[in-house]
Image (cartoon, helix red, strand yellow):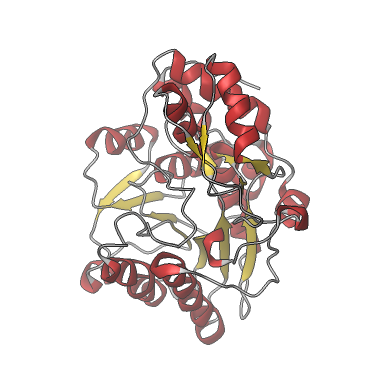
Amino acid sequence: MKEIRSGVPDLEEELGRPGPALVAEAADWPGDVVVLGAGGKTGAGIASMARRALDAAGREDVQVLAVSRWTDARGRAGLEKLGVRTVVADLSDPAAADALPDAAVVIHLVGAKFGTASAPEQAWMTNTVLPAFVARRYRGAHVVALSTGNVYGMTAPVTGGSRETDEPRPVGDYAVTCRGREQVFTHAARTEDTPVALIRLNYAVEPRYGVLADLARTLLAGNPVDLGAGAVNVVWQRYANEVVLRTVGHAAAPEPFVLNLTGPETAGVRALATRLAHHLDVLPEFTGEEPATSLLADATLCHTLFGYPDRTLGQLVELQARWITEGGELWDKPTKFERRDGSF
């Protein structure tokens, strides 16, 4: 396992590193790959990993296209340097969606979450209407659409979390519209025979962003940790990136392939914060009560198909503590994982 220090280039190289299984599968991808929403938190890692996997598989002829509004010039330049072709487009414009380049594989990462409590119409537009434009433009392509474990209801930690076969019980505009996105792509699978994979992700983490970064900042600021979430699942971002790409071969029609993507551990927030506080050499304080239920997912199917994450929860905690104490870059994008009312 490669050690990551506080340098962003070192981290980004690791987040985009394909494993040998992905390289072998990329050799059989049916054609060009388009990553929609590539300017978001996970997009650069997925686009660069796809390019590197194809290159390692001897498929330099296959393009990887990264689509975004591209307000991040540095991120765009980094992808171009790797050989990823970047495309500027506002996908909420149906004409722009119709003008997108052809592709045989679509990685749909576009979504709206934060700020949707005050502007729910944005969640509905981005999470339900926009996917319809994408489904129409790329009918028949292999579509992997990122979703969220928020489509499930709360469960007791002793259950191991919600399974893919459980009935969704979304709460709040964000979760409801994410379920709507799933239904839009399900419609494409059933009516257009578009192979679809729906990936329900629970809290991917890397040192700049995520549940562990949120907890570390709270602890170092001397603020109490909110116990409202009770327990959480987290998963290493590099592993999540790779699983998203490896599900290309599992996309199916007329019934989509559905997969929970998270780590194998169910971590109590109190225990997780206490462990992180030890590495940060601070005393944790807490507020609120630990509820009987939490938003949790059972990722047994994911681990059966793709193996366990290449970094354990303990290693992720240590990485987060070292990163923040050494002055590593942090993103001002709190996850709000402690929210239980579906309001973000």
Seen from the viewer's position, the closer of residues 128 and 293 is: 293
**Which residue is nearer to you in this view: 32 or 96?**
96
Name, please, the residue furthest toward the bottom.
191
Residue drawn where x is 39% and y is 33% of the image: 82
Measured as percent of width and height from the top left, residue 339 is found at 46, 53
Q: Position of residue 176 (x, y in %)?
A: 45, 72
Query: Could you say where residue 222 lies in the image, as x and y percent from the top left?
Result: 42, 24
Report the side of 159 relative to 201 (left or right): right
Front one among 314 and 287: 287
Q: Is residue 3 left or right of residue 287?
A: right
Instruction: Please indicate, yes or no, whether residue 127 appears anywhere in the rendered image.
Output: yes
Q: Quadrant of residue 260?
A: bottom right
Q: Can residue 311 be seen from the camera position used here?
A: no
Q: Residue at x 52, y 70 (%)?
A: 170
Q: From this view, report whether residue 250 is shown above or below residue 264.
A: below
Residue 238, relative to residue 14: is it above or below? Answer: below
Figure quadrant of residue 332: top left
Quarter of the picture containing the N terminus is: top right
Q: Is residue 209 above or below residue 282?
A: below
Quarter of the rendering occupied by the C terminus: bottom left
Residue 45, given in percent of the width and then of the height, sits at: 45, 39
